[in-house]
Amino acid sequence: MKKVILFGSTICVVLLGFSVVSCGDVVSASTPSEVVGEGEVEDELKHAVWSKNATIYEVNLRQHTAEGTLMAFKNDLPRIKELGVDVLWLMPIHPIGEVNRKGGENNANFIAEPGSGSLGSPYSVKNYVEVNPDYGTMEDFVSVVDEAHNLGMKVILDWVANHSAFDCDWTAHHRGYYLLDNTGNLQPPTGTNWWDVSQFDWEHGVQNGLYDGMAKAMEFWVSEAAVDGFRCDVAEKVPVEFWEMARRRLEAINPEVFMLAEADVAEHHDRAFDMSCAWHYHHLTNEIAKGREDATVLVGFVTNHDENSWNGTISERYRDAGDAMVVLSGTLFDMPLIYSGQESGMDKRLRFFEKDTIEWGDYSKADFYRSINTLHHDEEAMWNGDFGGTPVVLRNDSPKSIFAFSKKKGKSEVVVILNLSAEEVPLSVEMPEGEFQTVMSSGVNLNDSGEDMLNPWAYTVLSKLHE
C-alpha cells in the first residue's frame, strides 16, 4: 500500500451523479460489463455522512506492540482516539502464506531460508476468512472492532484482491481463480518481484467464479465482524467492474460502507470508491524536499508502510522538510493519515517480513498530529471532498519558495503558508479579506528590519475569526 505512515493524504472524494441501472448479479453475467451486483435501481455512490471530516490511522499490527497481537493493540485504542482519529485502517490480519516467504536472514526481497526469522508478508493471504493466529482469534478481532466502535472510531481492513499466497486454500479448492503458466503452475504477478504471491485471473473472473468468491469473502467481514469498509491494495490491478459489484453487495449489508483505493484512477469514483491515494502529489513532495523541484509544481500523504520499509523514514526522505510536508499533505487535500509510530517521531525503517516493534518513546509528535486532526474536524473548509472547500492558490512574492493557499466553505476559511525551500524568504502573501488567527506555526520570525520572515521549511496555518 503506498498509503503512508506519518501523515498521509488520502484524497479525491468525488460525489457522483445519478444514474439508472438494471439490477443483476455475477451469477447471470457472462462478461464484466454485465456485472452490477445488488444495488438499487436508482443507483449512485453516496458517501457516508460520518466520513465528511474523518481522519485515518494505519495500524501495523505486527509492529504496534511488543506482543504483536490484537488484544495488546486494543489497549492502545483510547490513546489513538485522543489523537483525533476516526478511522482505523488495519494492515491485513489474515493468516500468512508459508510457501516462498521472503526476508529473514536473506535480503528483504529474496526468498527466506528454511527456519529463518521471516514471518512473511501480510499481503500474502493464506485464507480470506480467518484471522492470523499470531495476532489472535476471530473473537479477539471482533472485540477490537467493538471497542473501536464504542470509542467512536470506524474500522477498515486492508484487502488484497489482486493475488494470494501460493498456499492459499483457494489454490487447492478454486484453482480456476488463478492465472496459470503454460505448464499449469501458479505464477507471481508479471513484472514484479512479488515471488511470495500468486496472480489471480481477473480477465476471466466472471466465468471462473472469482468475482463471486472474492465478493463473498469481503461480505463475510462486514456481516460477521461489523467491519466498516476496506482499503484495497493495488486496486488498479483489479477490474473496476468487480469493485463496483462488490461495493453494491457490501452496501446491502452496511449502506455506509467506506472504500479506499490504493490507486489513482478517476473511474474508481464512479461507483466503487470513496477515496484514493494522491501518488503523484506524494512523489512531487519528495522531489521538492531534495531540491529537484520547487513550489511551482504544486499548482497527500508523506509516509505509509511501503514508504517507511522500502524508501525510508520521513527523516531520511524529507530531512528538515518533514513537518512542512506533513502540514501540506494534511491540509491541501482531504483525509489526513497517520501511520503507526508517526506520532512518536519514529526514525527507523520497520522491517517488513520480520518482527520489529515500534519504539514509542514519549510520543513527541502527538500534539503536532492532534493539531492537524483538530483543524480537520473543526473547520468545515478542511472537510473531505465536496463536504469541504476547494484550495485556491494565493499570490506571493517568492513563488519558487512559498506555496500558499486558502480553503473556504460556509463561514469557515483557512489559510496555509509554507516555505518549501532551504532558504529564508520574506513572508509576502496576498491574504483573503477578514481577520485571521494563527492555529499552528513554526519558523516564522522578524528580521532586524521588523519584516516577517519564513525560515527554511517554515509553515503557518491560520483560520478566519467568525463574527
Image: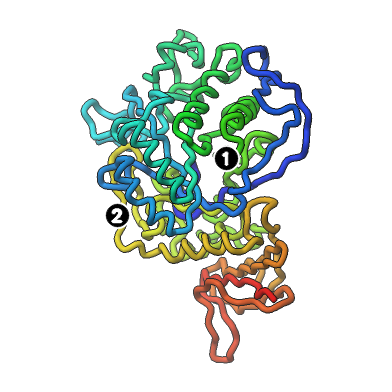
Residue, x 23% and y 25% (percent of image)?
114
Measured along the vertical axis of the image, is residue 35 above or below residue 264?
above
Q: Amino acid at mark 2?
A: Glu
Question: Which residue has dot 1 on it?
Answer: 258
Q: Position of residue 376 (x, y in %)?
A: 57, 60
Question: Which residue has dot 2 on it?
Answer: 359
Q: Residue furthest bottom?
A: 449
Q: Earlier in the sequence, mark 1 or mark 2?
A: 1
Q: Position of residue 342 (x, y in %)?
A: 41, 56
Q: Amino acid at mark 1?
A: Phe
Q: Is residue 462 left or right of residue 106?
A: right
Splitting the image into 4 quarters, where does residue 298 fall? bottom right
- Neighbourhood count class around disc 1 (C-alpha, 10 Å): few under 14, some 14–19, many 20 upward: many
Look at the image and tell me in which quarter the C terminus lies: bottom right
Q: Is residue 125 left or right of residue 275?
A: left
- Asked if residue 301 can be seen in this view, the reply is no
Nearer the observer: mark 1 or 2; the answer is 1
Residue, x 50% and y 65% (percent of image)?
371
Residue, x 57% and y 40% (percent of image)?
258
Measured along the vertical axis of the image, is residue 218 above or below residue 85?
above
Q: Nearer the viewer, residue 169 or 417?
A: 169
- Neighbourhood count class around disc 2 (C-alpha, 10 Å): few under 14, some 14–19, many 20 upward: some
Q: Position of residue 239 (x, y in %)?
A: 62, 26
